Image (cartoon, helix red, strand yellow):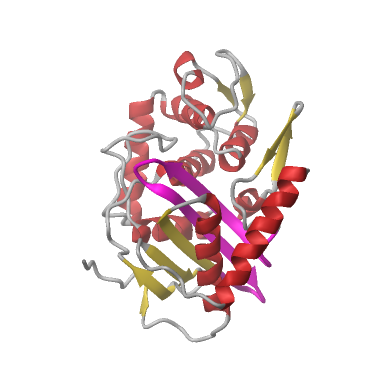
Amino acid sequence: MRQRHFLNLLLAGALALSAFAGVARANPVVLFDLKSGSILEHQDAFKRWYPASLSKLMTAYVAFRAIQAGEVALDSPIKVTKHSAGEPPSKMGFKPGSVMRLDNALKMMLVKSANDIAMAVGENIGGSQAAFADRMNAEAARLGMVGTHFVNPNGLYSPEQYTTARDLAVLVTALRNDFPQYAPWFSIEGLAVGKKALPNYNLLIGRYPGADGMKTGFVCSSGFNMIGSATRNGRTLVAVVLGEKSAVSRAEAAAKLLDQGFDTRAEGSTTLAALKPYG
């Protein structure tokens, strides 16, 4: 409780600064309107970047597609393998042989950003890490994510796992438009698993007005990444922020972008679909 209170105060102070300071533009960012695809802000949108745990959004997308195709169901068993149990933190720490429902596994993956669970989901649906990565890449190609490549379902560092802010915006659009029934999963404030309380790493959830998603990520090579979305008066904006210096600064940067977007009703000069590579 004390830690939560501290984070609330810390984020409140950071967000208050947004009235006096402009948004940093040192790293890739994209701000867009989910419904229209209109881009309100972008910087280095096609710059290659390590996605870290933002990769789990594609893992979720592949899983949703598998459910849609009837390959698996929400109550399908997900078994923790020795390989998945050995993945480094952040993780749930379940022992090899542990079994859970797919829907619960996906919620733990999205809220806790559990690397072991993401790997277990990939192995159970794809048959192996490599086979699931092939499915991730096939979906990326189908969606037009031209600057993206995956080798694992959890986003742990690999030089062969990369994406761009623009491609992540494309993925978010597909997730929210193709599978609106799962949208509430991206705004869960926390989960209780046994005696464990798992707060969402997304500091906007439950704090920023209208916040409803979507995911955070960090590896040393990428810095602190975040995709933050919020809905107000029927309008949903999404901010993709890559390479921030801390969990608080990525939340602050996303909040500033969202504030800017909600403060104007003007449409951007281009859309996500029409944005051409640059830089």
Specify whether residue 130 is painted magenta.
no
Residue 137 visible in the shown view: yes
Counting from the top left corner in percent of width and height, residue 81 is at 50, 16
Which of the 4 image quarters holds residue 154? top left
**Is residue 272 something one can see in this rendering?**
no
Is 126 on the left or on the right of 35, as rendered? left
Magenta stretch containing residue 222, yes or no? yes
Q: Quadrant for the C terminus, please.
A: bottom left
**Residue 179 in the image: above or below residue 124:** below
Depth check: give the residue in front, 208 or 62: 208
**On screen, residue 156 above or below 3:** above
Question: Residue 196: x percent and y percent?
Answer: 72, 30
Which residue range is magenta in the image? 207-236
| Count of numbered labels shown in the rendering | 0
90 shown above or below 81: below
Task: Please state if 130 lies on the left or on the right of 85 as rendered.
Answer: left
The residue sitting at 42% across, 29% down in the picture is 126
Image quarter of the N terminus? top right
Q: Residue at x 47, y 45 (%)?
A: 217
Q: Establish if 152 lies above or below 274.
A: above
Residue 39: image x %, image y %?
41, 74
Answer with the quarter of the image where residue 235 lies: bottom right
Q: Residue furthest left?
A: 279
Residue 212 picture location, percent across and down: 63, 59
Taking depth in this image into account, of 206 and 178 the one nearest to the observer is: 206
Magenta segment's dominant SS is: strand
Q: Looking at the picture, tell me which residue is in the foreground, 198 or 238.
A: 198
